[in-house]
Amino acid sequence: MTKKNKPDLERTWDVLVIGGGNAALCAAMSAKENGAGSVLVLEASPKDVRGGNSRHTRNLRYMHGQGNRFLTGPYPEEEFYNDLLQVTKGNTNEELARFTVQQSNDIGDWMMAHGCMFQPAMKGTLSLARTNGFFLGGGKALINGYYRTAAKLGVAVSYETEVVDLEIEDGVFTSATVVHKGEKKKIVAKTVVLACGGFQANLDWLEEAWGPEARNFLVRGTPFDKGTVLRLMQNKGAVTIGDPTQGHMVAIDGRSPKYDGGIVTRLDCVSFGIVLNKNCERFYDEGEEIWPKRYAIWGRLVGQQPEQVAYCIIDAKSIDLFMPSVFPPVEAGTIEELAAKLELDPIKVKETVDNFNRTAGGDLSQFKPGDISDPLSTQGLEPPKTHWARPIDKAPFYAYPLRPGITFTYLSLKINTRAQVIMAGDKPAENIFAAGELVSGNVLGQGYMAGFGMTIGTVFGCVAGKEAANV
Amino acid sequence: MSEKERSEALQEAGRVMTICNSCRYCEGFCAVFPAMELRRTFTDGDLKYLSNLCHNCRDCYYACQFAPPHEYNLNFPQAMANLRGETYREFVWPGFLAPLFKRNGLTIFLATLFSVLGVYLFARMKENGVENILGTWTGDGSFYTIIPEHELLISFSIVALWALIAFIGGIWKFWKTINPTNEKFFSGSGNKGALMDVLRLKYLEGGSYGCNYPDEKFSMSRRYMHHLIFYGFFSCLASTTIAAVMDHVLGMPAPYSWYSLPVILGTLGGTAIIIGLIGMIYLKTNQDQRPLAAEGMVMDYGFIILLLLVNITGLALLFVRDTPLMGSLLILHLGVVFAFFLTLPCGKFVHAIYRYVALVRHNQEQANRK
Ligand SMILES: Cc1cc2nc3c(=O)[nH]c(=O)nc-3n(C[C@H](O)[C@H](O)[C@H](O)COP(=O)(O)OP(=O)(O)OC[C@H]3O[C@@H](n4cnc5c(N)ncnc54)[C@H](O)[C@@H]3O)c2cc1C
Ligand code: SF4
Ligand code: SF4
């Protein structure tokens, strides 16, 4: 935008929103609509890559009484709530969980009124067609729509403005210190909404929590979510919830960029092949569960292997069975050649594949991709492959290198249903609110449910904005 | 499918297509993504087809989390437009005309110059040529005082036929490339579907909110301008056809009164086209340059300006037909119309042809899938 649109960082703002993703924008719009005179959004990133991890998303889960043009049927409160209890294995704050589900009721309508466009579920994701609203064009289109609406409402945005310090006295926020174009500035506001994501892009912190292997993790989303504000709040006495070693980790293509590789680096081939580590050994049952359900476990598994790398090997029979991914597979006419291309020991790899092939199989006509009733499992192999175990014998052979990719961390600021941050002594802060990934651990203590990250951001963003406007 | 033989535009189209095919977030915007999803790898023919299926609405540029400055540097509309430009040269018939796309501004300029000059010499050749041109003529057949009827009819039939044959040649070459299964062009409901898509200009509405044109906001303006030009064009075509029938079949020589069908249709059509073209110029000059394929701009403006001239001279002729300016303006008008038809197969107009063919293929493919 032009110079004249640059917000004035010297004045006192009514509501200051830290972050520029889904939660932040929902908070900013909601604050403005609930009567806040002036709202300023501080986004650490440049405008072109604004929107944090939210711009990588594609859908949001919400409660609704009936289907519509985009959703194939109703998703009632109890079902939603039970789904949540199931994935978290009860590791959730029941009051906040119930609140989140209820507040999400028909939230799609609010979203559309604020610039979101929906489309019917994407092909290949039909399992979510009833429960999740898919954004037309994905998360970046959603975020663009929100920024447009926010601008119309009079919300000011300052890009390339990273918060590096917060002034909080006796649990009351007074100002934030930012770095803007290399310059330090103090921004004064009456209330603040913290909506600046997890700390998954902070490799130092990840290393602190996970050990040195964390250096080899790939960060699937924005490099700007470094958890600076989370750490600041911890130091200022905010109560946190969850454990820093909890995070959503998946196995992605090992050739992906360090940051921001996004959705296209995911690999859905594991259940159709075998996975070897650097030592050319298998280490886990590749056929344990249907892939989407096991998607999240493999990040950790690969993270525990030497050099945090693994290789998925499949053959010509399986190459068309999963979604294509961004990097072409490594391809060779024989297993030995394939191993050489992966810089693995050809003899050992051949041995592992042969061992697998000897024990795999049965009636191959019973093979049922994507269906857990598939009967093909290995006999007497350790570890076994309990489904989809077809011999890897049809050239050409293919391999994908795998590395752990971290989506987000769960460590969160504790909040109440007014989205107020809970300070030491269980005291809610008067004028400090939080939303989005930064609070996800309150409801999602563990596990993951597709589209729920955006639900948390939208629900608590709206609540935080409204509360902040009324302080 | 060796990478080395692939042109740069093809390589880039293949690269971005592979990324999109593993993302698919833009599925709801247009026909390109559903067509893409039917494939796992992309042959040259596939890419050429998909690039012409793209209507350049740019929705997928602004929606893309991998657009520049991201390291994937994904600029889908630009990659498609660059490849499209290449397909225009590849499929032009006869093939030796391909370089005319590269120097399209000059081509259109020279074609116009020589056409106007040609018509002028034609008029001069007639008995009392100069006096005719400068005279004031009214009533039935006054145009033919300037230009001999017979020769006019023959030369315009020839140039129209040229355009038609060249299009058929281009369609034939393109169809063979994008349709390896040898499905017949007229088989199934491909043409019916494509026609419906074209009449609505369905894919200029993106995922029903319009194009991101000229900038990030969704807007129907590009679609409406295209509608004006599209229907204006057919209105003019109808006007010309009716006039030709009245003149040469029914024996009612032109010019016709203000309230005659050809004049009404022509005036409405011409005005619509002029508004549409000016709108397009406005949008083009104000567009965000980032998703743009710069190479195509000369071609775009060349076509727009020539079509503007056709319509402005045509409308002006209505107003001055009873004055001594009629002769000169008629020559000018006929000249630019001649140049318009002459350059039709080697300019921007072909985008409509190949898009239509791609839509036929798309409609067939989607029908086959079901
Ligand atoms: C590839 C991928 C796909 C995903 N798909 C889905 C999906 O389909 N559905 C779903 O529900 N969830 C999905 N998620 C998870 C989802 O992205 C998050 O749950 C959600 O985006 C969190 O929103 P947020 O607003 O809290 O954080 P973010 O969107 O990450 O926003 C945080 C913002 O804060 C800014 N920021 C950070 N630190 C500072 C600072 N110090 N000062 C100023 N600004 C700062 C960042 O620049 C950023 O703009 C996906 C994640 C990834 C990586
Ligand atoms: S343009 Fe970008 S967002 Fe759209 S499908 Fe392609 S990669 Fe995905
Ligand atoms: S520019 Fe528009 S028409 Fe072209 S591929 Fe993108 S969304 Fe489809």
Image: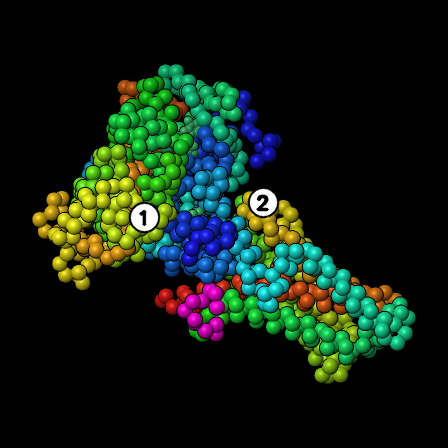
On the rendered structure, is A133 left or right of B74? left
Which sits in the foreground, A271 or A319? A319
Q: Residue A246 falls in which quadrant of the image?
A: top left
Which residue position is annotated with label 2? B289
Quadrant containing the N terminus of chain A in the rendered view: top right
The numbered disc on residue B364 is none
Which residue position is annotated with label 1? A330
Q: Residue A413 falls in which quadrant of the image?
A: top left
Residue drawn at the location 13% of the way across and 58% of the way down:
A362
3D distance between C-alphas at marks 1 and 2: 37 Å
- Residue lying at the far top of the rendered structure: A169
| Image spot of residue A427 (x, y percent) | 31, 21
| Image spot of residue B311 (x, y percent) | 72, 63
Kind of residue indicated by mark 2: Gln
**Part of the protein shown in magenta:** B176-186
- Residue lying at the far left of the rendered structure: A380
Is residue B183 found inside the magenta-colored segment of the image? yes
B295 to B49, vertically: above or below: above
Asked if one can make out residue A203 in the rendered structure from this viewpoint, the answer is yes
In which quadrant of this rendering is ligand 1 seen?
top left
| Overall secondary structure of the magenta section | loop
